[in-house]
Amino acid sequence: MEAAMTEDKAGRRGRSARRDGAAKPHGVPYIVRNIPTYDILSEENLQKIERTADRILAEVGIEFRDDPFAVDHWKRAGAKVDGVLVRFEPGMLREIVSSAPSVFTQYARNPANSVQIGGDNVVFSPAYGSPFVMDLDKGRRYGTIEDFRNFIKLAQTSPWLHHSGGTICEPVDVPVNKRHLDMVYSHIKYSDRAFMGSVTAEERAEDSVEMARILFGAEFVDQNCVILGNVNVNSPLVWDGTMTTSLRAYARANQAAVIVPFILGGAMGPVTNAGAIAQSYAETLAGCALTQLERKGAPVIFGNFLSSMSLRSGSPTFGTPEPAIGSMVVGQLARRLKLPLRCAGNFSNSKLPDGQAMQEGLMSMLSAIHCGANFILHSAGFLDGLLSMSYEKFVMDTDLCGALHSYFAGVAVDDNTLAFDAFEEVGPGSHFLGSAHTMRNYQTAFWDSTLSDNEPFEKWSEEGGSTDIATRANRQWKKTLEEFEAPPLDVAVDEALCDFVARRKASMADGWY
Amino acid sequence: MEAAMTEDKAGRRGRSARRDGAAKPHGVPYIVRNIPTYDILSEENLQKIERTADRILAEVGIEFRDDPFAVDHWKRAGAKVDGVLVRFEPGMLREIVSSAPSVFTQYARNPANSVQIGGDNVVFSPAYGSPFVMDLDKGRRYGTIEDFRNFIKLAQTSPWLHHSGGTICEPVDVPVNKRHLDMVYSHIKYSDRAFMGSVTAEERAEDSVEMARILFGAEFVDQNCVILGNVNVNSPLVWDGTMTTSLRAYARANQAAVIVPFILGGAMGPVTNAGAIAQSYAETLAGCALTQLERKGAPVIFGNFLSSMSLRSGSPTFGTPEPAIGSMVVGQLARRLKLPLRCAGNFSNSKLPDGQAMQEGLMSMLSAIHCGANFILHSAGFLDGLLSMSYEKFVMDTDLCGALHSYFAGVAVDDNTLAFDAFEEVGPGSHFLGSAHTMRNYQTAFWDSTLSDNEPFEKWSEEGGSTDIATRANRQWKKTLEEFEAPPLDVAVDEALCDFVARRKASMADGWY
């Protein structure tokens, strides 16, 4: 059977069609989903979760530490403020966030790569925030600015990512107080996709936005989203000043904050899903509302990262079933708020790009896809409980992201896809390999991975060297980096950015914490 | 954070609770799903697919080769018969299958392990039909009866499978015409779960049922399902006599045939999903109807196996996105027929238990889960495009099946899971580790894999030997086989079965094809 198919016209033409396809530098700028969301909870149960969140907000409250401006916002908005503890009447925050857009465009410096965030649109963005990097040759070590640039290059080259990401790994060789300058510059220099800025201090958030102004022009930036800032809640129920000042810096500039509680059930939240979801909802809602108090109408993304823990060791676990199924509910709740949703995907606690890594990764990734996430952070590279960015897993994940483009396409039903003419032509007991219907459709019929092995065993072992997918990924990322060419960047803009970075770096001593 | 949690009471007690859990020989006999199905297609599009299937059945027809009794059944039922080609008026087959039960019990010799097939129930069954086996030590070689028994033992030991399966691998060292006797005996001897019999010839199907009669009693077998037979369509649109005579043997004995077309899009069916689904529906419906003509009311399972092909090589591909999303539609169609649904999961074309294997496997497995499959064949061990059964992947898959038990539990919403008392107790900025709510719930909170590594990197590399999951799986299957004890079997029954096998073997010369 296999031999017959290999020699068939469809197979041969498919092969060359694939080569043509591989030469195309990019896929679509973002995905428009053609499958529904997977809604698992009833209206009644959704309301129970919302009411519990309302009670948490009204009776327990959230602390806003080290940011008096944020507390003042809440006072003016009518919340009950007691020192840093803020309590909210039921419905108040939902009313405030109603001014945020349900869909917005984040512009890229290459307009063809601008992304729509919200609605039926889906954007895949690389993993974010690992201090370490790893590969099969050198194992695990601290990330450097060279690693940071390498991952931007790998992301930029993949047709299956849509965003350059943010702190794609920590460049530990650059002083902490100057990293953001090198990171934002690297995103602009080596990628022409949309990206994220720094959030580790208000002035670093402002520097990030300022560099975006150099790239896009100050007036454009004031009216359009060109940069995202990913801010984390200090769960349970605390917003730290570092985060709220950065959040407000982005909102003030009309840029989108991504509001994300990371809740490890049993530690930063209840061990039961419904309670963790209610908490996540409350914390995110408060952050989203704060952006609207800073600047009404500023874009904001409702984020979420549920996780679980190992009962044997107390370690966080990733890609497990309870957070995966819990995310479906978060999706339902976010849609009731009409806010764009951020989830995470492709995450794992494995220390290698092995079976555990891909199984846990896909569990989380399909969860993000089914729950209706619009912006999927951590779409590529995540290993080691987010402590390490893996070169091999990065390209394995981008290949998987390619497969998911086909998944999102759903099942088209029309006269061509129903193929009745093919059955009339082929009839019982024959085959469809050379049929007119096959010839008309094979080129777009199936996702064809560039990393998965689909050869017969003998060919895999004799010609292919009996490789596993991680070994093939190792070859692929090296080849991609060797062949990389940066997208063109206007020389004057490049000089202005370099000048800004040099001036800012010269203005302060190196800080290492 | 990790250190703090490791030392926490919840962590320590969780560990011992897990040990208790691991000592428990079995989980639940089958899963009752607490999550809805994932329905992706509109009523209008479902009807278009049904109408196309009706046209295929009425205008193109299906050939029933080498089984005049089957053709006679169709004549009597009013189908249009032209030699071996049979055509069906729209609606005729749906009317015939309406006599089949929508849910039935398959009894196991241990009544606690009997399974419900249909409705909201889900049964995980091992992979089926590989000529080869492989493990990390010895690589790939032909399967033997010892391998066959080993896989039954691994399945029987896992709390996360519910069924012993059928031709779990081909015992190539046993003559073809006698294999079924050793296989059925091995299922009965080494497992006390439900199982499947042979379908490679009518007399082998009858032998399989006869052995079930020795085990359960002839009268019980006549009234209850105790054995399944997995029969394949010779797609496109051909039913071979070997399959229909076996199908009829099972139905005649009131046992359940599982009706499965394997459609490799572009070869045995159209390259477009909608057409392949319509074909699959037509072929399966005809097989299901034939069981009802043989014995009205006999249980039958509506099966399905969509696949795709590599455009580069023409090889079949497994665990790819198009068949995964297509299965959702098959599920919707099967529910409209009110028939139990069989899908396949955990399948891959990888030659190793690597990242490709687990990513492709989970893509297919979650598809089977979301589409509402009641009987999921190939739940453990499938590699190499079904040509090899892998010892390591078998235990990796069973561990994943364990995780999926938690996934199926969905998100419970009640006062306990909403955990408002926990928020009142903990408040902002503290943690939930020792809270009353956590202490009350942690033991059942999270799935805890016995194969995944969730340790910190240092512990994994220093104490754990930097293993990947396949290496850990290699250790686990060996330990499981070493410690295996067969479930008790009545001595008189065992002797009667051995006697039957000996007599049947003595009655014919060895046949090797």
Image (tube, coloured by chain):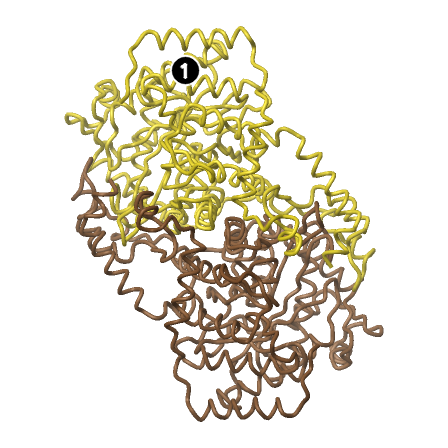
Chain colours: A brown, B yellow
Query: Chain under label 1?
Result: B
Q: Is B450 left or right of B177, judged from the image as shown?
A: right
Q: Is residue B48 visible?
A: no
Query: Residue B28, located in which quarter of the rendered image?
Result: top right
Q: Is B442 left or right of A165, judged from the image as shown?
A: right
- Secondary structure beneath dot 1 equals helix
Q: Is A174 left or right of B314, judged from the image as shown?
A: right
Q: Which residue is mark 1?
A: B209
- A34 versus B241 height, above or below: below
Q: How many marks?
A: 1
- A280 versus B474 height, above or below: below
Query: Residue A50, located in which quarter of the rendered image?
Result: bottom right
The one of A315 and A244 positioned closer to us in this rendering: A315
Picture coordinates of residue A327 (x, y %)? 59, 55
Q: Residue at x 21, y 54 (%)?
A: A12
Picture coordinates of residue B263 (x, y %)? 30, 40
Picture coordinates of residue A220 (x, y %)? 50, 88
- B32 versus A296 height, above or below: above
The quarter in which the C terminus of chain A is drawn is bottom right
Picture coordinates of residue A232 (x, y %)? 66, 69
Query: Residue B511, located in which quarter of the rendered image?
Result: top left
Q: Amino acid at mark 1?
A: Val
The one of A469 and B332 positioned closer to us in this rendering: A469
The one of B343 and A398 positioned closer to us in this rendering: A398
The one of B80 and B84 positioned closer to us in this rendering: B84
